[in-house]
Each structure stands twice: as C-alpha cells, then as structure tokens.
Amino acid sequence: MSELLDRIRDTGIIPVIKLTSVEQAVPLAKALIDGGINAAEVTFRSDAAAEGIKAIKKAYPSMLLGAGTVINKDYAQRAIDAGAEFIVAPGFNPEVIDFVLSKGVSMIPGVATPGEIEQALCRGLDVLKFFPAEAAGGVAMLKAFAGPFPNVKFMATGGINADNMGDYLKQKNILAIGGSWMVKDDLELVTKLSREAVTRMHGFTLGHIGVNGADAAEAADIAKLFALFGLVGKEGNASWFCNSNTDATSFEVMKGSGKGIHGHIAIKTWNIERALAYLKQFGVQPDMSTAKWTGEPGKSQLSFVYTTLSIGGFAIHFNKI
C-alpha cells in the first residue's frame, strides 16, 4: 500500500466539505484538526473549491487534502494545480480517470457495481469509492464485494453518519469512510463532532485482562481462585484462560511473568494500524517484535501487537476484532 493510502487508512474518516467561500476554508480546516481529523475532501460542487484547497494547503501543509466530485478533466486539472493529493469522483468516468493517472496523481473513482470494479482493476486501481454507499446496498453490498474482490479496498461515502459509521469501519475491505455530518456552520460544533467521531471509529472494547503468575503452579492456583466467581479455567501452553458462560470478557493467567509489572490488558479494535496511528500523537509506539499478521503477503493486516503504553502496571496490547 502506498504512503498516501496508508495516510487515508490511518485517518479513517475523510470529511467531505463544500465551501461556500474561500474565506471559510482555513477556519473550517482548523476546526477539523482541533477535533483530531487532519484530512478533508473538498468537493468541486462549489466554485470556491480550488482556491479553498490552496488556502488550506498554505495554512496547514501537513493536512491530507483530496478533491471530490471531480466529474470532468477541467475540474481534475484545477484540483491538481491547487495541490490536491488525491482525486475522488462519484462515478466511473474512464476519460477523467485516465487523465488523472496520466498526471501521476492518485485517483479514487466511484463504483457501485461489480462491472465498475472490474474496469478499475484493469487500470491497476484497487482502492475505490463506494458511492452512494447506503443507497447502493451499504454494508451488505460491501460484504458481497469481498468474495469476488478480496484485494479491493473501499472509501465508502453517502449516507454514512455517527450512528452507522462503526458498521462500515469494522468491514475488512474498508480503507476509510467519508461523510459530512461533522461539517457544520458552528466551528465549535465541528470540533466536538470530529473529536467524537475519532474516538468512536476504532471500536475499542476490552478483550481480556492478563495477570502475571510467578510460574505454572502459581498460575494454576490463581485460576482456581477465579473459579470461585464462576470463571472456568482452561489451560494452554503459556497461560490459563478463565471465562464465564455469560460474559465474553475473560482473565488470562500467565505461567510466569509476562509483559507489564502486574500483567496486561488486551484491547480489541477494528484496525490496529489505524489505532496505532491515533495513539502515536500521544507518544505511544508499537513493540513490533511482538507483532502478528493475517492475510496475504503485501496485503497483510496486524492482528496483534503490544504497545509501549502501560496503565497501572499493566502492559497494553491490541487484538484485531
């Protein structure tokens, strides 16, 4: 995956903004950034789009900016000249796609059918815009696409909001989602809604809590104590897992001191790479010596990794949901 697509994946949410004026561009960009979203797709449904992109790039050079609703070559050229890092179209127009690719700029065309996906693959494109997502079948359609097109990733836009964003982001073939629900006239509200979206997009849930035992014998004794609370222990090679029949959250008892002073906490998330990018801003790094992967070579996703974060003497690791 290219560096640009990694950035789109790590951002997770690409706000779709329609500028009513160039003067609106920089304050709106700041409100998004203050809310933790350092990206936007500026739609060419407004005459202010090209100049707005230029203004944002000048004020916030590190902000990831794409141009949306690029439905002809004129829009494409204006977007490229303005500094857009990627071009997004609502549909599949071969003339526009070939023009953008000839300029060496990343293109994310819109698709809603298997035939359009096949045409994109013939052009070497495997990251596509699924639009209009909800009207075109939503999550059910994405699941249907995953069978015949396992290596295609989608940026889904159209009808996505704070209530259904999680349904999309948990899908394996979703690179990111787009939406405008956080784009309001009230800039303080933009920041508030953006911050809420950022924390919700990871799907963080507690997986289990690990407790360090001194050795195998002590681990067995601890597992017996958990049985007092109806948590039935099952022995594995390196630990015991103690589970309840009614609660998916469990305890892991290590047969020897594992990571963390007291043990570890497993956090589940939909996309570990995206979660790590989120935590990086707080100084948290992954311990890649512990990393485990799933998927094909070159298309693999992290399924497990410890981080440098420790809470109350418990090391933190991620498990992919």
Image (cartoon, grey):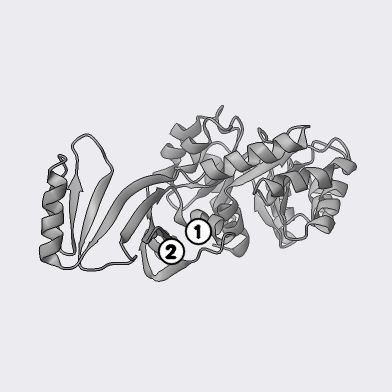
Q: Position of residue 172 (x, y in %)?
A: 43, 47
Residue identified by numbered label 1: 276
Kindly identify the residue that appears in the image at 71 percent across and 45 percent down.
32
Number of other residues with Cα within 10 Å of mark 1, as a class: few under 14, some 14 to 19, many 20 or more: some
Q: Of the residues tagged 2 and 1, which is closer to the observer?
A: 2
Q: Nearer the viewer, residue 266 or 138?
A: 266
Q: Toward the viewer: 193 or 224?
A: 224
Amino acid type at image mark 1: Leu
Q: Secondary structure at mark 2?
A: strand
Residue 192 is labelled as none
**Farthest residue toward the bottom?**
289
11 sits to left or right of 50: left
- Name of the residue lying farthest toward the top: 135
Q: Is residue 70 visible?
A: no
Q: Is residue 248 left or right of residue 276?
A: left
| Residue toward you, 68 or 72 | 68
At label 2, which amino acid type do we have? Thr
Hey, which quadrant is residue 130 in on the image?
top right
Disc 2 to disc 1: CB gap under 8 Å: yes
Quadrant of image for the N terminus: bottom right
Residue 186, x across and y down, in percent: 77, 33
* Residue at horizontal 11 percent and vertical 51 percent from the top: 224
> Could you give the CA–CA distance between mark 2 and mark 1, rounded to whole angstroms?
9 Å
What residue is shown at x 18% (from left), y 36% (from top)?
245
User: Label 2 crowding class (10 Å Cα cut-off): few <14, some 14-19, many 20+?
Assistant: some
Q: Which residue is mark 2?
A: 307
Task: Using residue 233 as the reference point, say whether residue 78 is left or right of it.
Answer: right
Residue 208 in the image: state x and y as whole percent: 30, 49
Name which of mark 2 and mark 1 comes first in the sequence: 1
